Amino acid sequence: MTLKEAQNLVDEWIKTTGVRYFNELTNTAILMEEVGEVARIMARKYGEQSFKKSDEAVNLPDEMADVLFVLICLANQTGIDLTEALQKNLEKKSVRDAKRHWDNEKLR
């Protein structure tokens, strides 16, 4: 699935199942909540925190998909083509960081 296809799929789902988009501010808050859920899993699975009994059913792929879904909602609402945005972002990083990471001793 391409990013454009994902944006179209989410838009169709919102219009047929979700009724309408939440407003942009609400979706921004939801995005932060979903990112927090990913962070919680990462801290427990890859960091020093331990899982609690209530964490037994955590599903990292599903939580990451929640983040992507809400990000796509926000892109759709604000007229952002994520394919174009990602391409431009990678071009910017390629120029800005052309040597930066290779010169970083911490990465070797």
Image (cartoon, rainbow, N blue to C red):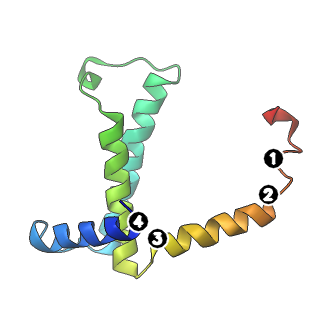
Residue at 69 percent across and 68 percent down: it is 91
- In-image side of 12 versus 52 (left or right): left
- To which residue does mark 4 refer? 3
Where disc 4 sits, the SS reads helix
Give the mark nearest the N terminus, 3 or 1.
3
Where disc 1 sits, the SS reads loop
30, above or below 56, in the image: below
Compare residues 70 and 94 and report the one nearer the observer: 94
Crowdedness near tag 3: few (<14), some (14–19) or many (≥20) residues, C-alpha within 10 Å: some
Is there CB contact under 8 Å for labels 3 and 4? yes
> Where's the C terminus, which quadrant?
top right
Q: Position of residue 90 (x, y in %)?
A: 65, 64
Distance of label 3 from label 1 (alpha carbons): 25 Å
- To which residue does mark 3 refer? 82
- To which residue does mark 2 refer? 97
- In-image side of 22 versus 39 (left or right): left
- To which residue does mark 1 refer? 101
- In-image side of 61 versus 86 (left or right): left
Residue at 79 percent across and 57 percent down: it is 97
Answer whether residue 25 is visible to the viewer in this image. Answer: no
